Amino acid sequence: MAAPRVVGIVGPKGGVGKSTITANLAVALTRAGASVTAMDLDLGSANLHVIFGLKNVEHTLDDFLMNKVAGLESVLLETDVPGLTLIAGGNVPGIASLPYQKKVKLVRHLARLKSDFLILDLSPGASHNMADFALIAWRCLLVTTPDVPSLMSLYSFIKTAVYRRLSLFFRQAGSEPLGQLLDKAKDADAHADLKTMEDFYGQAAVIDPALAQKARQILAKLDFMIAVNRVRSAADLKAGQAIRNLMGNFLSLDGGKIYSVREDAAVSRAAARLKPALLDAPSCPFATDIETIVRALQDAAGRSCLREVQA
């Protein structure tokens, strides 16, 4: 069986509804006929299992990371949704800063899971660990709310992921000069001549034209989707375009398609009953919007490419 198609759910600012979207996206995919595993990578503050009404779980991802079980199959949890399994995150201090070897082991075991889709509920923030998991994904859904702090947190994460990807590439290629140039580009205030990714590409091409072109091609393969959550008005939809503009103007990236997820009281009512909204109110506006994202994933579905995480 092929490796699962990995969908990373990114919400760098806490409270944007990332875990809620993860849970409901998983339900919607199973209703579309797919087998799904949802994994809580919000290590240290895990709550995905609670959304499904699972309060006391016997095993969590911590058990695997701490070598208490041999494989991820031992920590899979059954849910009330046919075709949907769950891997609950844990709360062991320090686990959120995952060592490299454990991260590589986890990625390899993820590729062995027997599901059509693997949905990763990533931790808030812009750490290298979370960027790495976003970068192995077949598709990455960037979740934000329309407020400015959420937008800036999301853009910060995207920048971290971009620089992380290029840093790993230049290290692997053995190009110290381009690695040093990239380090300068990270501090645009001190290096105004490297304010945009096009500025970087231009100077990189002087040092090594072939590697500079390869770097451009690598970033062009990043396939981000943007979900603006809790949309109340047409003006709120402009938040997605704002992120796309930043990505295009400063990082030379295509922001992908923007999806709106409407504010819906059915979500909070479902949460109070410890159920995903798609189970509690399957015809609500929120559910309709989630199903639109699922159709996009189905249209784009192809063989997953779980890439090896580099040091």
Image: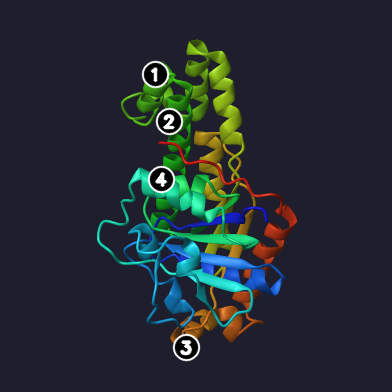
Residue drawn 39% across the image and 72% down it = 59
Q: CA distance from mark 3 to mark 1?
A: 55 Å
How many other residues sit within 10 Å of disc 1, few (<14), some (14-19) or many (≥20)?
A: few
Q: Which numbered tag is attached to residue 273? A: 3
**Residue that numbered label 2 is attached to:** 167
The answer to whether marks 1 and 4 mark residues whose Cβ atoms lie closer than 8 Å is no
Which residue is nearer to you in this view: 92 or 261? 92
Q: Earlier in the sequence, mark 1 or mark 4?
A: 4
Tag 2: residue type? Ser
Query: Residue 72, position in %: x, y?
Result: 47, 62
Q: CA distance from mark 4 to mark 3?
A: 34 Å
Residue drawn 33% across the image and 47% down it = 99
Q: Is residue 41 above or below residue 32?
A: above
Q: CA distance from mark 4 to mark 2?
A: 16 Å
Query: Residue 155, position in %: x, y?
Result: 45, 46
The answer to whether marks 4 and 2 mark residues whose Cβ atoms lie closer than 8 Å is no
Query: Dividing the image into 4 quarters, which one contains the N terminus?
Result: bottom right
Q: Earlier in the sequence, mark 3 or mark 2?
A: 2
**Residue that numbered label 1 is attached to:** 176
Tag 4: residue type? Ser
Q: Earlier in the sequence, mark 4 or mark 2?
A: 4
Residue drawn 57% across the image and 28% down it = 216
